[in-house]
Amino acid sequence: MVYEEVLIPLAIGMVVATAFLVRMCAQARTTPRAAGAVFLVVMMGAMLLGALVYFVHPGASALIEALWVTSIVMSLGVVPVFITFVRDAQRQADSPEEYAARPFRPTLGFALLVIALILATEFLMGMVFDIASGTSLAMLDAGPYGAVSLIANVVQSPWFIFTMAGEMALTGALLRHELPRPLLALLGVQTAIMVLTPTALSDAAWRALAIYGASVLMIGIFVLGMEYVYRNREIPASIAGYLLRLFAVYGLMMVGLFLWLGYGLSEVYVLSILVEMVLYFGLILRSHALASDDRVSWQLHPNWAFALLATIFVAEIFMGALLDQQIGLQYYGTNWFASLGMLGLVGSPASIAYAAFYNGFFFLAAVTASTWFLLMMGVEMGALVVFKLQETRSRETRVRLGLMIGSYAAFIVFFPSIYYSLVFPGAPARDAMPLLGWSMGIGTEALAPAVFGVVIATYLLTAVLSMAFGRRWLCSVFCSAPLMFQGTTIDAMKSFNRSSGLAHRFLGSRFSTAYSFTMGATMAALAGTSVLSYLDATGRLSVRVLGLDPTVFFFTLSFGVLWYVMFVTIPYAGTYNCVTMGWCYTGVIAQAFQRIGAFKLKVYDRQVCRSCTTLDCAKACPVGLVDMPGHFRTKGEFRSTKCCGVGDCVETCPYGNLYIHDIRHVLGRAFGVEVARKRPSRLPMVHGIPVATHGTPPHPAGPPAQAEVQP
């Protein structure tokens, strides 16, 4: 047994040596230099292999065997290096000009070879150091599964994890000048996540710290990646591919951590660690590929955008489940996953298919309704909203965005998930109370008659607020949807509203056939499940859907499952698809009252809109109301029950010619008080000029005159 005082300096030496060898491989411009670097890596592996031979059966004979093994591996490694030197010298002598013009660049095959050698070396070091520090290798005699367990145990050991993390950090520092700054920050966060590996140490405090810390860093890496995509609408194809692969690996990592924490299965997590190492060092070794002229305009590639959202969402779902599991074990002594009551995958194929659907449905619904998932999503998507808030000029929009963040924190996370359970610890389950557990239902269980008046009051409040301020109070402030849709990156995906074939069916303010069908089916389902729920609560029927009251099931399906599926499919369904498609029944109810209310968009001067050729207002609309410019030109105002008052059209108008009209303006006129509006100080167009046509400049010659502002 070797003490840690000896092993730790050796591990640090391995970190430094490996990092410099990786840099040598990445910066090699001749094949002999690349071959020499590879040979040095082989030498390290050979020495560790010899040490492993000795430690397995220590003794005088084992020492001789170790020396023979080391010598044989090194000798074999010299042969390809020697051949490479000879061929390179011959090529240089035959055509020196071509040789100088075509320097060596690490190819994909070369990078994979180096990565394989590094991983093998680190694995051997982990085995040697584990044995040297007293770990048993009895699993070597357990057959194929024992070999799998051996690999899993070595990869999870602190000698492998912390040494590999050190190599990642030092390699990134050595090659920092060859990497773009955003990518360097991304690699730094990757390294920190590797350090925070919960399985590296057996201490419970370390496990909790690693899970929470890695979750925070992973949220940060998702925000960093999405913000990079937003700031760079065209990104190098290599980075685009790297982001997708990295986020997919993190999804796999969260699945693995959840299986490890819930069932003690570590193989999936170990696989994710190894794949992440391949990604990291593959990018380091082939950083020259980042300079390629091949770029991706991601707004023209819905499949890529969908893959980005899908990989992030998978990671988030299992991260939320992991947090639920860890917090349940740490603070309540409960197994969160076991409390879901999953069905066994046994019986006939039909029974197995039903059980798989049942388990998947309730797993997704349970995670999306949990406090920690909602908190995590609020932080992640809220960060993107904060970035948007910083670049927003309109004070009214800035205030609305602030209210939106506060509403999410208070009414989506704190009140239903934390406040309710703290204040009413003995109350019945929330799915038995329409106001607290689900929305807009008529009743379920014994509490339904008691809270019927509260549900009616909710309808009345919805009606009053929608008539006064339009549906913006709900769809742009109070609901969880605006926080998810209005961050920088997701907001930029509104371009898919016009380019996607499915989303294109719902463009404009008119009720298309597709919209009418979706809205009608949604409201019919709400009415039908509410009636069934009421009859069930009064004892006239006994109806359950997957074991749930019909209205509770409808809410769970709509906002626990369907909402997130539609969010992930934004590149095909468009942004704000809950509004554009009419499948959110709460929004449909609000829009019915908006139709008879005061809410609308108005312009100061319709002549400005007649002469405008930018159509920026329509392009900025997140719900695809592409016909609004025509209404501004002919009527000077625009009414649509689909408009949810985001205000991007007001913010984007290059002439400051738009404003939102609601109850404030009605009351202001009634009491003779003018509502403060930011009027355009100098419009670029005047009355009387012709409407701009194709090829006609939209601005008159000379300096723009002050336009008359119409009331």
Image: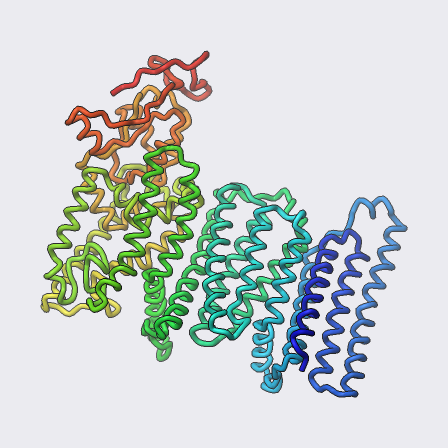
* Relative side of 92 to 23, left or right: right
Position above or below: 627 against 520: above
Q: Hey, which residue is sitting farthest front in the picture?
A: 5
- Using the rendered image of the protein, determine whether residue 242 is visible from the camera's viewpoint: yes
Return the residue nearer the eye: 453 or 416.
416
Work out whether residue 124 can be spotted: no
Residue closest to the eye, 250 or 411: 411
Q: Position of residue 550 (x, y in %)?
A: 21, 63
- Quarter that holds the N terminus: bottom right
Looking at the picture, how far across and down is residue 445, in whole percent?
Answer: 15, 66
Residue at x-position 52% and y-position 75%: 202
- Is residue 374 toward the left or the right of residue 244 in the image? left
The image quarter containing residue 412 is: bottom left
Residue at image location 15% in from the left, 26% down from the top:
671
Question: Against 500, is 353 above or below?
Answer: below
Q: Residue furthest right?
A: 93
